[in-house]
Amino acid sequence: MERQEVDTTLAEIREALDAHDWDRATALIEALRPPDQAELFDDLKPDEQNRLLPQLELEDSADILEKLEEEKAAEVAGRLSTQELTSILSEMEPDEAADLLGDLAPARAAQALAALEDSAEIRPFLAYPDESAGGLMTTAEIVLHKEMSAEEAIAHLRIVKPDAETVYYLFVVDRGGCLVGVVSLRQLIIAPPRTHVSRIMDPDVIYVEGGDDQEVAARLMSRYDLVALPVVDAERHMLGVITHDDLVEVLEEEATEDIFRLGGVPEEHPADVPLPAALRTRLPWLVINLGTAMVSAIVLSLFESTIARVAVLAAFFPIVAGVSGSAGTQTLTVTVRGLALGEIDPQEGFRIVGREVLIGLANGLAVGSLVAAIALTWRGSPMLGIVVGCATLLNLIAAAAAGVLVPIGLQVLNVDPALASPILVTTITDTFGYFVYLGLASLAIGMLI
């Protein structure tokens, strides 16, 4: 739905609300698809949302809360009465209802859960954190027993009528409810009617445990092109499934989280986040960055006499530090991505460092030579060109090594590499670059004056 269409429909809904024309207001929003309903509903003011939501069909209200961002859905739910909230929760998928309840105040969530008739379907999902496989899973609509025949399994499918997204691959359990295999719909259809499911299923089924991180589930589904991934407990009892649409959401969340953290923002916040909350998130990291910048300032202060005698050295500070900082960021980005996707094993650190150092050496020779030529042409001093070029070369090698060692070291220490690496790598490239540059200049001071 185009933004212009959203604005037009939004204006029409507001006119209908002001005129207390509930039929027109609900007709306008119920005519939209769930994602468009949520986008339009989010654009309404809180008092407009409060007036509109009780007028909608429960199914539409449930769709809106499912599609809204978690914080906003919790805010809307918090303004509803317990009766209104439980009515909407009853229309939601159990996993979606559990996610919403998990975002509410504990007392309010317990009150709503107690009022639900089908709370037993929701409680298992509340036992797992949001970012775990158990928190991501949904109910397995259909599970086959290995003693079933192909004919019985197909008859069971006709009775249950599962969603299209879960019917292609069906998971098989034994009498104790433990996962023992997977069978495709195609295999069921072409198998002789009396063939037992246990004879046509694949016993080598890929699964995750409920407590596993959602990234583990996402990697498995991506690596093996899975449409659905079963979730089990420690004894392999079937708990639920993770579907491909959940995978897309996880990948988007994890990518967004890493981008924010590489920028020094530990949590994602929308543009309209309150100012105090934004400051609490960003200010601490700026203060930390200030502390690391002071290290560079201390290094510079050690060479005050050199800078005073050859003032032109200051003109090349941005080049020595800036070029190396960019190289460090390039290496850091590749390394953090590889760690996040499981493509890089911390045990391979030395091999990767060697490769990146070679790249840094090649880049250093090229860029260092270019910088030396610029210094020579601009200032007419061969020695200045040699000092600037050598400093750039050495700092590019250091940046390459830091871009690998820092995130891998943080990973080994169980610290998120995406969050802390940028500040540390920048500190290393700046400090080392200034030290080498001014150190070389001090050694060659007689030839620079």
Image: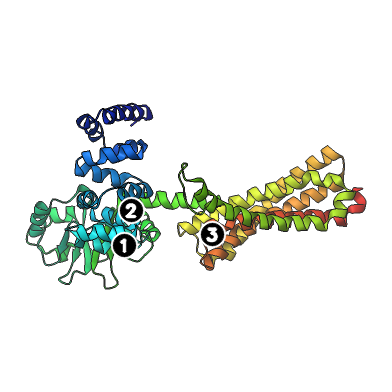
Q: Which mark is residue 417?
A: 3
Counting from the top left corner in percent of width and height, residue 448 is at 89, 48
What residue lies at 56% left-to-right and 60% top-to-bottom?
407
Q: Along the line of sight, which residue is nearer the eye, 35 or 114?
A: 114
Q: Which mark is residue 381?
A: none
Give the crowd class for mark 3: few <14, some 14-19, many >=20 residues within 10 Å: many
Amino acid type at circle 3 is Pro
Labels 2 and 3 touching (C-beta < 8 A): no
**Residue position for label 2:** 225
Regarding mark 1 in the picture, which secondary structure is present there?
A: helix
Residue 161's place in the image compared with 402, above or below, is above
Q: Is residue 253 left or right of residue 328?
A: left
N-terminal of the pair, mark 2 or mark 1, is 1
CA gap, disc 1 and disc 3: 25 Å
Labels 2 and 1 touching (C-beta < 8 A): no
Residue 35 appearing in the image: no
Regarding mark 2 in the picture, which secondary structure is present there?
A: loop
Q: Along the line of sight, which residue is nearer the eye, 41 or 183?
A: 41
What residue lies at 60% left-to-right and 61% top-to-bottom?
406
Q: Along the line of sight, which residue is nearer the eye, 7 or 36?
A: 7
Number of marks present in the image shown: 3
**Residue position for label 1:** 134
CA gap, disc 2 and disc 3: 27 Å
Q: Is residue 149 left or right of residue 361?
A: left
Q: Along the line of sight, which residue is nearer the eye, 187 or 399?
A: 399
Amino acid type at circle 2 is Asp
Q: Is residue 348 left or right of residue 100?
A: right
Residue 437 appearing in the image: yes
Counting from the top left corner in percent of width and height, residue 404 is at 59, 59
Give the crowd class for mark 1: few <14, some 14-19, many >=20 residues within 10 Å: many
